[in-house]
Amino acid sequence: MSAKIIAIVGPKGGIGKSTVSSNLAIALAEMDKRVIAVDLDLGGANLHILLGVKQNKLTLDDFILKKVDSLNEILIDTGIRNIRLISGGANIPDIANMPFQQKMKIINHLLKLDSDIVILDLAAGSSFNVIDFLLIANQQLIITSPESPSLIKVYGFIKSTVFRMLNFHFKNIDSQEGIELLTRAKDTDNNPNLKTVNGLFKELSMTNEEAVISAKEVLAKFKPNIVINMVHKADEAKAGNVISAMLKQYLDVTSSVVTTIPADEMVRRALFKNKPMMTIYPGSPFSLAIKKLAELCI
Ligand SMILES: Nc1ncnc2c1ncn2[C@@H]1O[C@H](COP(=O)(O)OP(=O)(O)O)[C@@H](O)[C@H]1O
Ligand SMILES: [Mg+2]
């Protein structure tokens, strides 16, 4: 049986993607799931440190440089029961901008990994490389902080993802009208009727009703989960509802706020000790929130 792939993304750096990835891996492992954590923050790899792995000899660099033939050969035992790691490379300049073929090769190998769960810790931003890894996942966790600038970035990130999905789809079904509408929709000042995905569908339905039906089916499968991290006060969690409403209204994307994770000073302390939060402070507010998140991921 193939693994469930969970992608951890977030348009901003330093928002907690790797912290959530590593601790979620531990929470799932404690629930007797076999987990492979994959550091895909190419160029900024640090997941191994968060999992307490010091030895980082075998990395994705070795796979990319064809020193090994399969990802199985670079799987590292983390010493934590049920968790193996694919460590991100750090030595190939410009690797975050790898060519399409290289990315497809990694994707094909990721899809073949033997595990219950594969966690992808992705880079910040909304480059095609990030989005394409995101699109192979069965579940997408979008990590954000509750402040407006971060939420706006989430909206922009999901919009880029939706446009990429629709672009792939229209190319697949050979709908030139669809592709042209997507290009025009980038300029909403001159095309205000294309400001929402539903507006775009309305326009497309005049020439190609079938393309609209199939595109809606594709979009319906994309249900990202928003995780609000570093919450200081309970009412900050409400920020997620605002972004969910925007995603529905403008992009026809149904998202839900899966959970909120409190800002917890012990996270920093664990980092200094080079130990994952879940292992040294399992009862802390952060760890309890991660356990709740893990339950929503199985
Ligand atoms: N819930 C939290 N409470 C306190 N500090 C946090 C929390 N989540 C993340 N951090 C801290 O924020 C910083 C960035 O986290 P990191 O996971 O590396 O972000 P990213 O992978 O998104 O770049 C780290 O110093 C981490 O310890
Ligand atoms: Mg990171």
Image (cartoon, rainbow, N blue to C red):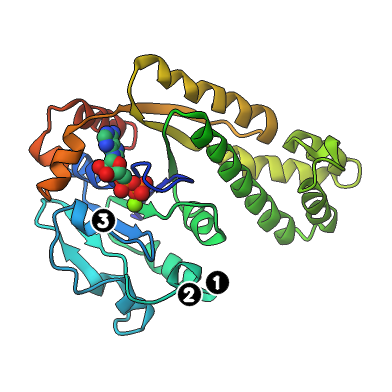
Foreground: disc 3 or disc 2: 3
Q: Cβ of disc 3 within 8 Å of ligand 2?
A: yes
Q: Are marks 2 and 1 in contact (CB under 8 Å)?
A: yes
In this picture, residue 116 sits left or right of residue 244: left
| Residue underneath mark 1 | 100
- x, y percent for residue 89: 32, 70
Rendered-image quadrant of the N terminus:
bottom left
Q: Secondary structure at mark 1?
A: helix
The amino acid at mark 1 is Phe
Label 1 crowding class (10 Å Cα cut-off): few <14, some 14-19, many 20+?
Answer: few
Q: Secondary structure at mark 2?
A: helix
| Residue underneath mark 2 | 102
The answer to whether residue 135 shows anywhere in this view is: yes
Q: Secondary structure at mark 3?
A: helix
| Residue underneath mark 3 | 47
The amino acid at mark 3 is Leu
Label 3 crowding class (10 Å Cα cut-off): few <14, some 14-19, many 20+?
Answer: many
Residue 268 badge:
none
Q: CA distance from mark 1 to mark 3?
A: 24 Å
Q: Cβ of disc 2 within 8 Å of ligand 2?
A: no
